[in-house]
Image (tube, rainbow, N blue to C red):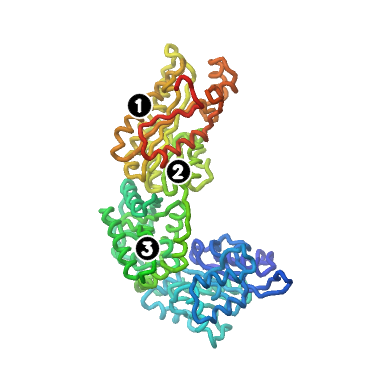
Amino acid sequence: MQSLWVEADAQKFTTDLDLRVYTSRLLGQNPNLVLHGGGNTSVKSTATNLFGETEEVLYVKGSGWDLATIEAPGFAPVKLDVLKRMAALPELSDTEMVQAQRAAMLNPSAPNPSVEAILHAIIPFKFVDHTHADATVALTNTPDGLEYIKDLYGDRVLVVPYVMPGFILAKKIYELSQGIDWQNLEGMILMNHGVFTFSDDAKTSYENMIKLVAESETYLKSKQTKTTLNGTTPVDADLLTLAQIRREVSIAKTKPVIARLDTDAASQQFASLDTVATIATQGPLTPDHVIRTKRAPILLDTDIADAVNNYITEYKAYFERNNDGSLTCLNPAPCWAVWQNRGLISFGSNLKEANIVADIKAHTIEAIQNAEKIEKWQALPEKDIFEMEYWELEQAKLKKSSSAPEFQGKIALVTGAASGIGKACVERLVAKGAVVAALDINADIATLFESKSVLGIQCDMSDRAQVQQAVNATAAQFGGLDIVVTNAGIFPSSETIEAMNPDTWDKSMAINLSSHQALLQACVPYLRLGFDPAVIIMASKNVPAPGPGASAYSVAKAGLTQLARVAALELAKDNIRVNTLHPNAVFDTAIWTPEVLEKRAKHYGLTVEEYKTNNLLRVEVTSHDVAELACMMAGSAFAKTTGAQLPIDGGNERVI
């Protein structure tokens, strides 16, 4: 643990709040100190109110802000005297505390103050820093944790037994601090929770944090009597089994989830420990994490369905053991899994949520193993974890309505995704909440989309091996597959049957027909394990209404449509819907080059503009129009439809 303080940078900040932002970001840059909104910081300063009066204010980190990226507006300005008076109250519910803190804010548009605001207020220093440092918390999460902390820090820190965060914790420290000479303290250790440091100087408060945590890291290593823990040899994870795991968890949660599989060395090592079933289920690294991870992961071995059902049963029993009769049970589905001898899986309603769980999990398993090497891992008792998980402030969130995007948690794959209809489908699916594997022969596909929800994969769709690899990569990245938009295609130059180059025919058949069969063959095993799976096949108006000189294209698309009809018949038993779109005259696509467009317009005796709107409605059909309809086919509007063929062409007399 090293200080990141740079004096030249610090000199740029002159106000209390600017310095507070600077050192908060230094803390937030280190994931061994805080993760995803964890920890909080404050500074005591002054502000001028509406009447021109100077008031003492506590600028404290606001709810929803992350220390790594926090800015000045992320600090809630609260009247300091009100917070101090609140600490002296005999009792106060956390809901009342939040309301009172908000009423004492100078800026009503600022975020809600941290639930630790009262605690920050009663610490008699200008700057206060609070983290959930891995090494320090790992030391406290052992049977002899209190002795370790006393041995390491002596009287340099105030040691506080675990108390529920919020008003109860603030009240406890308010009582403990009476008569204490704070000037003799370098910090405060909250058992099983975290570290506080403080000073009237921003640099001193920050560097005291770094110093105390660095000492924890050194002490932790010095106490370790085991260099490694016993385990078995990891084995490769089967991706279809991963898709089954994701399906069972999605069913338990009643909505689809992303399943992020980690098979790095650390994850495989932990999943292969002989004692993993015991140590992984003790509890989280710090109680703050329980909101993200639940108290324990699910343990998976061979029978996936039974494991998920048992987890749900045990979670409900845990709830009943601790419920006082006034609480609402949270969703019982697991948030992460130990897939024994294979790796670790993080579940999330979206990719961001899954990644947050994965980060917390990574720090947790390291802390667990460090504790096991010096003694044994011992998290907080079940009752304490339950109280945090079912904290009244968290229960209040259940009463707030929230609407998720239609495809949140769903996994899609789109071919021909670098331009035109395919690109538009990727963008629309992401906008509706899905994660998407975007396949294209164009190498630019790997970096074409800025969204982290898109996995760009270069793939020659006429190469079956590459197609299978791309589908497997999608499952490995996200956990399975729910939606397939098979769109890749080419538009050969106009040639009569008599004069056709054999290569024109063969290439069209390979890309416009055979590649789609190869993709379906690779995707069906995953779709069978998907959540409300759907396939959308991009055919063409040339199927119901072919034109001369386009036999290579029209015949391939007709075969593709027949493939879709057979697929609908075969896959209905697996609840996989297969529907077909017949776009026409969609000119913002890669196949409609200016040369092709000019040639086709000339063939029909039209100008390019006339050709673009040559339909009954006299409208131009865009790739985004097609994408919107494709998403409808993948969604609830077509939940009871399969085998359908739908034109999107502005109305064509020959088709009608």
Tell me what residue is drawn at x 45 percent, y 67 percent: 288
Tell me what residue is drawn at x 40 percent, y 70 percent: 387
Q: Amino acid at mark 3?
A: Cys
Q: Camera-side residue: 393 or 489?
A: 393
Mark 3, residue position: 329
Instruction: Check disc 2: other Cα within 10 Å, few if <14, some if 14-19, many if 20+.
Output: many
Could you say whether the residue bearing mark 2 is in a helix, strand or loop?
Answer: strand
Q: Are marks 1 and 3 in contact (CB under 8 Å)?
A: no
- The disc placed on residue 435 is none
- The disc placed on residue 562 is 1
- Distance in Å between CA atoms under marks 2 and 1: 26 Å
Q: Is label 3 or label 2 in front?
A: 3
Q: Is label 2 or label 1 in front?
A: 1
Q: Camera-side residue: 504 or 488?
A: 488
Could you say whether the residue bearing mark 1 is in a helix, strand or loop?
Answer: helix
Q: Is residue 14 left or right of residue 444?
A: right
Could you say whether the residue bearing mark 3 is in a helix, strand or loop?
Answer: loop
- Distance in Å between CA atoms under marks 3 and 2: 32 Å
Q: Camera-side residue: 573 or 470?
A: 573
Give residue 124's position: percent from left, percent from top. 59, 80
